[in-house]
Amino acid sequence: MATLKDKFTVASRDALKLAREPDNDDKLQLYALYKQAIEGDVKGGRPGFLDLVGRAKFDAWAKQQGKSPDAAMQAYVDCVTRLKKG
């Protein structure tokens, strides 16, 4: 039986080759869950007003604050699974 880390690794690869491109909200969720799983809580300051993409990524990751790496990995796997089903 595959471990959560194995499932996360497979889901990370699968996310790059989805049949349909995820919308921006799903992309931000995948980004935030991945960063939370790998690096933990967001660090540093929020990007400036003119960096809209950076701010969106920072805000999405900040919403995952306090989520354990295992919980973030499971949520990431679940999100990729949902996106694969289309």
Image (spheres, rainbow, N blue to C red):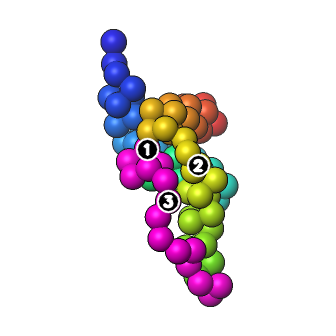
Residue at coordinates 56% horizontally, 78% vertically from top-left?
47
Residue closest to the far bottom: 50
Which residue type does callout 1 highlight? Ala
Q: Which residue is mark 2?
A: 64
Q: Position of residue 74 (x, y in %)?
A: 50, 31
Mark 3 touches mark 2? (CB < 8 Å): yes
Tell me the element at label 1. helix
Q: Look at the image and tell me in which quarter the N terminus lies.
A: top left
Q: Quadrant of residue 84?
A: top right
Which residue type does callout 2 highlight? Gln
Residue closest to the far top: 1
Q: Which residue is mark 1?
A: 37
Q: Position of residue 3 (x, y in %)?
A: 34, 22
Q: Position of residue 10 (x, y in %)?
A: 36, 34
Residue 42 marker: 3
Q: Badge 1, how many Cα within 10 Å: few under 14, some, many 20+?
A: many
Can residue 21 be seen at all in this image of the molecule? no
Q: Nearer the viewer, residue 77 or 72?
A: 72
The residue segment tinted magenta is 36-50
